[in-house]
Image (cartoon, grey):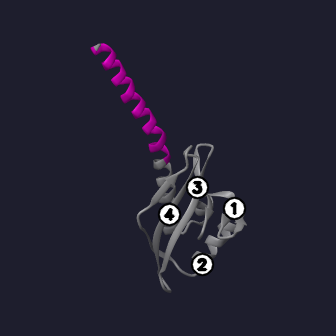
Amino acid sequence: MKRIILITSSMAILLMLLSGCFFIDPMVKVTKLVSDFKKYWEDENAVGLAGLYTDPALINTAMKSYSQIKDAYSSRFEGRDVIFFNRGDVEVDFNVGATEATVEFSAVIDWTSGPGDDRIYSWTVKKLSGNWFISRSNEY
């Protein structure tokens, strides 16, 4: 009887640990996506930022290609430099299969010239070939 309880308990613990891996891994990768977004903003890296999106991606209400997204970021960085990109707390909600998620966070972008930008980002991110990409965003 003790042996059956021990085996059952061990299997239950193993199952809980394995099921947790399916949600920990996507969370780590989506968190890295958001961290890369912040880093590329601070580095003023339009190519890096555009590479975080699907091709095409829905920005506001229009589908944009990789080159259009890259050009939009490049134009934002012309004539002024980013001092910092201060990101607030990130909220992530995964769909049932953990292949898509909604991501929301606020950010304050401080520039060398002109006023700072206060933004609230709202994304849909998708898992493609093991990596996560922004497929829909309300902002650049």
Front in this rendered view, residue 70 or 53 = 53
Q: Earlier in the sequence, mark 2 or mark 3?
A: 2
Residue that numbered label 3 is attached to? 125
Task: Decide which of 92, 111 is in the foreground and name it.
Answer: 92
Query: Label 3 near label 2: C-beta < 8 Å?
Result: no
Amino acid, disc 3: Val
Image point 49% across, 59% down: which residue? 34
**Residue placed under numbered mark 2 in the picture:** 78
Whether the magenta-drawn stretch holds residue 12 is answered as yes
Depth check, mark 2 against mark 3: the one in front is 3
Q: Up-down: is 104 above or below 75?
A: above
Does 72 sit left or right of 117 as displayed?
Answer: right
Circle 3 Cα neighbour tier, 10 Å, few/some/many (<14 / 14–19 / ≥20) = many
Determine the CA span between mark 4 and mark 1: 22 Å
Which amino acid lies under the numbered mark 2 shown in the image of this protein? Glu
**Could you say where residue 68 lies in the image, as x and y percent from the top left?**
70, 68
Dot 4: within a 10 Å radius of its alpha carbon, few (fewer than 14), some, or many (20 or more) residues? Answer: some
The residue singled out by tag 4 in the image is 104
- Asked which secondary structure carries label 2, the reply is loop
Q: Which mark is residue 66?
A: 1
In primary-sequence order, the first of circles 2 and 4 is 2
